[in-house]
Image (spheres, rainbow, N blue to C red):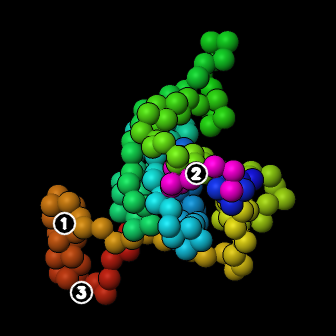
Amino acid sequence: HYDIERARAARRVDGLALVFFMGLGDYLMATPLLPALRATYPELPLYAYASTSLDQVNSPLVAAQLEANPCIARTFRYQGRHVTDRGRVASFWKNYDYSAALQDVPEHFLMLPVLYDLDPIVPHRVTSLFDTFGLPPPWPVPVPLVPRQDLSARAQAVLDKLRAEARAFRASGIVCC
């Protein structure tokens, strides 16, 4: 559990460096936390750090989502890697090397891993994240926040083709899962 106010009272804090080591679904669950942090600490920029690795712990898709998030001032990518334990590759986030993220954290930024509790007693990941960051957990739990992004030219071409085919069949809409 982080006590950001206590840290600020003890030393100079110019911003928050949020280290994400999670997949896209976990990131989506974390999105309600970001506007709450922004509102609680409007004078502190939020920098995000996301791994370029695609493995059991991380998804490189998280970085693109962070870049589109209006609450995040800057997004940095780092190369995370599994740490081996007696020849076995560790797949759990606690045994993961995130040290490459440290090189881009500015002096006087408070580095905070974005973590939630996995205990079965926790009612929801979102409430756990708020609790971790010392914020009052919201209830009811807010839905994930996904900022609109422009599509790439290739994605737009695919969407245009889908829409044309849907019109040909007089479909009333398109559902993507």
Q: Give the CA distance from mark 2 to mark 3.
A: 61 Å
Asked which secondary structure carries label 1, the reply is helix
Asked which secondary structure carries label 3, the reply is loop
Q: Nearer the viewer, mark 2 or mark 3?
A: 2
Q: Earlier in the sequence, mark 3 or mark 1?
A: 1
* Mark 3 neighbour class, 10 Å CA radius: few under 14, some 14 to 19, many 20 or more: few
Q: Which residue is mark 3?
A: 170
Residue under the image location 17 percent in, 71 percent down: 160
In percent of width and height, residue 44 lies at: 50, 62
Q: Nearer the viewer, mark 3 or mark 1?
A: 1
Asked if the residue at tag 3 contacts the one at tag 2, i.e. Cβ–Cβ closer than 8 Å, the answer is no
Q: Give the CA distance from mark 3 to mark 1.
A: 21 Å
Question: Looking at the rendered structure, which numbered label has been put on residue 156?
Answer: 1
Question: Looking at the rendered structure, which numbered label has been put on residue 27?
Answer: none
Residue under the image location 44 percent in, 33 percent down: 103
In percent of width and height, residue 173 lies at: 32, 82
Residue under the image location 15 percent in, 64 percent down: 157
Q: Which residue is mark 2?
A: 12
Q: Amino acid at mark 1?
A: Gln
